[in-house]
Amino acid sequence: MDFWTRLRSAIKQQNTTQEWVAGKIGVPLSTFRKWMHRKTYPNLREGIEIAKLLDTSAEYLITGIEPKDLNKELNEKEIKLINAYRILTPMEQENAVVAILAWAEKRKRWIHSQ
């Protein structure tokens, strides 16, 4: 399951609509629909707000991993990645997140096609 499928599922589970979520986080419905049609991703702030509104976690929407699974110890590469992320500007952080998520989705599709 990918980000968009998890987002659709969370909206359905909360018995709400795309219009309601878009209005609550302050984005045009057309922007929200682009997310739902896999054209773009929400930025980090929007993703966190969406998760809160839908009573889930941003980690789950992005990765599919439940937050309890994220409490494991980080390895050295993960720590380096987090430290590198923290020195970026907010715009650079957002660009990095979008790029990594896009790469991960592409990788997932490749794995599933094998």
Image (spheres, rainbow, N blue to C red):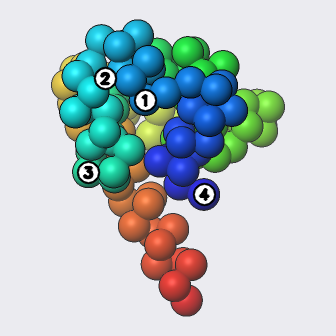
Picture quarter containing residue 21? top left
- Image location (x, y in percent) of residue 4: 47, 48
Q: Nearer the viewer, mark 1 or mark 4?
A: 1
Quadrant of the image for the N terminus?
Answer: bottom right
Q: CA distance from mark 1 to mark 2?
A: 34 Å
Q: Of callouts 3 and 1, which one flags the residue occurring earlier in the amino acid sequence?
A: 1
Q: Residues within 10 Å of mark 4 (few under 14, many from 20)?
A: few
Q: Of callouts 3 and 2, which one flags the residue occurring earlier in the amino acid sequence?
A: 3
**Residue under numbered circle 2:** 87
- Image location (x, y in percent) of residue 105: 44, 60
Assess whether mark 1 and mark 3 are in contact (beta carbons under 8 angstroms): no
Q: Nearer the viewer, mark 1 or mark 2?
A: 1
Q: Residues within 10 Å of mark 1 (few under 14, many from 20)?
A: some
Say what secondary structure mark 3 lies in. loop
**Residue under numbered circle 3:** 39
The answer to whether any part of residue 6 appears in the image is yes
Amino acid type at mark 3:
Lys
Amino acid type at mark 4:
Met
**Residue under numbered circle 1:** 18
**Residue under numbered circle 4:** 1
Amino acid type at mark 1:
Gln
Quadrant of the image for the C terminus?
Answer: bottom right
